[in-house]
């Protein structure tokens, strides 16, 4: 059995067959591309790629000390041959993506055109439209209870097979691996969402939130969609922060329908994941 862990900061792989739209899936903090395993076979008619990013489960050393996470995300986008036409970003990755797209034009070409992005799906993003919505209780909640978000990730990934005491210990361990610098990178992105120039993000966008998400509240997904020029939002009933694991069929149906209706493509049936991954860069 191959136990090698690839510690390159950014690893992008093609995951499914298909000649349809090129779709890149981006995981959130302290997760990895395994969050998409149940969704991959359900994204019919798409050529799906996944990225493993520096803030993944393996915790690439010192990533949290880097002030510019969007640079890593740019490398992932550039690694998809022909460009990722649709980017699906979960949790903190959605915020890094928004930060990247918010940057001023480089040479007159904005990030959407530079990377060839035609549509976005933002799942469980963190967003507040005004600085006044951040107060001391917000900081207390996300700092002192940060381990609960990590614990929820472990619980959902494991299918509830761990008892509460083990689950709590594992959540605290993941929190400690993220570390203070990693937490600050996350919260700094969150704090800066009121200043996002959302008018720059002009491509069709689907924002998905979970009804029971105690990390990125569902009302924040609705507010983000309202702030974007061309966006719709859906709050998924019964879901928490990881709808792609909790309700993969529902999640994939929303994503697939959005992609094909937006890009004018037709879903195909019978497409399976590749039997062997194809590393790209």
Image (cartoon, helix red, strand yellow):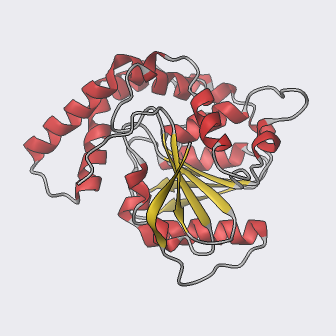
233 with respect to 134 (left or right):
right
The x and y percentages for residue 79 are 63, 44
The x and y percentages for residue 21 are 69, 65
- Residue ranking furthest to the front: 1
* Residue visible at 45% across and 72% down in the picture: 249
Residue 95 visible: yes
The x and y percentages for residue 81 are 69, 51
Nearer to us in this view, 268 or 163: 268
- Residue ranking furthest to the right: 108
Quarter that holds the N terminus: bottom left
Q: Residue 19 appears in which quarter of the rendering?
A: bottom right
Residue 127 visible: no
The x and y percentages for residue 102 are 73, 31
Quarter that holds the C terminus: top right
Residue 90 sits above or below residue 179 on the image: below
* Residue visible at 32% across and 39% down in the picture: 149
* Residue visible at 30% across and 42% down in the picture: 4
* Residue visible at 38% across and 43% down in the picture: 31
Q: Residue 182 appears in which quarter of the rendering?
A: top left
51 with respect to 6 (left or right):
right
Residue 80 sits above or below residue 254 on the image: above
How many dots with numbers? 0
Residue 267 sits above or below residue 6 on the image: below
């Amino acid at each position: 059995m191959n136990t090698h862990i690839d510690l390159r900061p950014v690893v992008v792989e093609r995951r499914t067959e298909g000649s349809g739209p090129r779709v890149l899936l981006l995981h959130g903090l302290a997760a990895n591309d395994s969050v998409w395993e149940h969704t991959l076979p359900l994204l019919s008619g798409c050529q799906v790629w996944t990225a493993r990013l520096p803030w993944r489960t393996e915790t690439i050393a010192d990533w949290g000390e880097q002030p510019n996470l969007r640079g890593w995300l740019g490398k992932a986008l550039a690694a998809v041959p022909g460009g990722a036409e649709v980017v699906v970003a979960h949790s903190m990755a959605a915020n890094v993506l928004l930060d990247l797209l918010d940057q001023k034009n480089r040479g007159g070409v904005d990030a959407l055109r530079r990377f060839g992005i035609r549509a976005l799906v933002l799942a469980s993003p963190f967003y507040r439209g005004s600085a006044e919505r951040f107060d001391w209780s917000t900081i207390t909640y996300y700092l002192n209870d940060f381990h609960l978000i990590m614990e929820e990730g472990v619980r959902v990934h494991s299918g509830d097979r761990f008892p509460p005491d083990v689950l709590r210990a594992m959540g605290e361990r993941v929190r400690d691996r993220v570390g203070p610098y990693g937490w600050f990178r996350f919260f700094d992105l969150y704090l800066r969402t009121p200043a996002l120039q959302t008018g720059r993000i002009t491509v069709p966008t689907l924002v998905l939130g979970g009804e029971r998400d105690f990390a990125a509240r569902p009302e924040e997904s609705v507010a983000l969609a309202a702030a974007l020029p061309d966006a719709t939002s859906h709050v998924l009933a019964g879901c928490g922060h990881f709808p792609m694991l909790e309700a993969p069929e529902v999640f994939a149906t929303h994503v697939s329908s959005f992609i094909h209706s937006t890009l004018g493509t037709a879903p195909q049936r019978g497409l399976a994941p590749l039997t062997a991954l194809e590393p790209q860069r």
